[in-house]
Image (cartoon, rainbow, N blue to C red):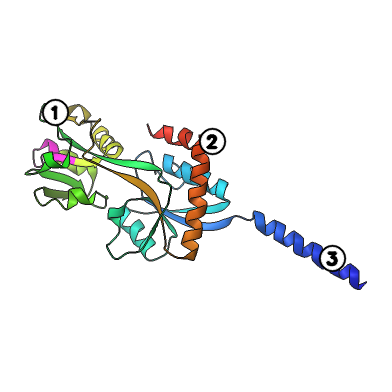
Amino acid sequence: MKMLKILVLSAVFSLGVSVSAYLEERVVFGSFPIPLMVIDENTGVFIELVKAIGQRANLDIEIYLAPPKRATLSFANKKTEVLFPAINSIFTPDQKYLKSRESFYVRKDFAFTRKNGPLLNDIKSLEGKTIGLTRGYTYSNALLNNTKIRFSLANRDESNVRKLLARRIDAFVVEEKSGLNAFLNTNKASRVQYDKFQPVSKEDIFFAFHDNARGRRLESLVSKAIREMKHDHSFDKIMARSQ
């Protein structure tokens, strides 16, 4: 009888271990709306990528979507465990964070100008001019720290479109797809231009984690999943939808 109890307990314990090994780990990823890339909690190229990572890494991922500043603040306050898409300039100098070893996108900001005017395609060419930026967006430090550029802020991309065409700004600097979407929304695409082969700035996009034991473990799982997806080309298939 004693041996039977031991065998039963061993079987129960083994079953518990095997079941728990397959249970998905709950993780909250924070993000913000981006045309095509992050449309809502279930739709967008980046969302599809995150879901594929979750399946491969055995993570039950919940998406927390908010405006850029609130999403960044939620990560800083540790209400979310992962922030994406992240670039270095969204963090304060004293904020500790861990970057995924695998980047997954290159953010490219372009200078949109009025048609028939000069093309502006590097930060140097923006000096001495008034440049429209959108509040809440992230921009490269090389752009923001250039004291020879005057910046004019607007709450929405569409507001910068109107300012550009009203000659209140000389150029509108924005991520390519966000900019194109704003000009399409305002039916002004035919009145502007940009050098699509030469962004004024570009930065690797990564997943940001908290710099602690759990963050390091999550980073390892996520980066491993991305590496595997790049190796079997499933990563390329998803990201091709952003073209």
Would residue 154 be seen by someone viewing this image from the given angle?
A: no
* Marked residue nearer the N-terminal end (3 or 1): 3
Above or below, 90 against 201 in this view is: below
Q: Position of residue 127 (x, y in %)?
A: 9, 44
Classify mark 2: helix, strand or loop. loop
* Marked residue nearer the N-terminal end (2 or 3): 3
For the point 10% across and 29% down, which residue is it?
Answer: 117
Q: Does residue 189 show up magenta in the picture?
A: no
What distance separates the C-alpha of mark 2 from that of mark 1?
Answer: 43 Å
Q: Would you name the residue on which mark 3 appears?
A: 8
The answer to whether mark 2 and mark 3 are in CB contact below 8 A is no
Of residues 134 and 195, which is closer to you in this image?
195
The answer to whether mark 2 and mark 1 are in CB contact below 8 A is no
Q: Would you name the residue on which mark 2 appears?
A: 232
What distance separates the C-alpha of mark 2 from that of mark 3?
Answer: 43 Å
Residue flagged by tag 3: what amino acid is it? Answer: Val
Number of the label disc, if any, that sits on residue 115: 1
Would residue 120 be seen by someone viewing this image from the given angle?
A: yes
* Marked residue nearer the N-terminal end (2 or 1): 1
Q: Which residues are magenta?
A: 164-172
Residue flagged by tag 1: what amino acid is it? Answer: Lys
Mark 2 or 1, closer to the camera: 2
Number of residues whose C-alpha sits closer than 10 Å to that of mark 2, classed few (under 14), some (14–19) or many (20 or more): few
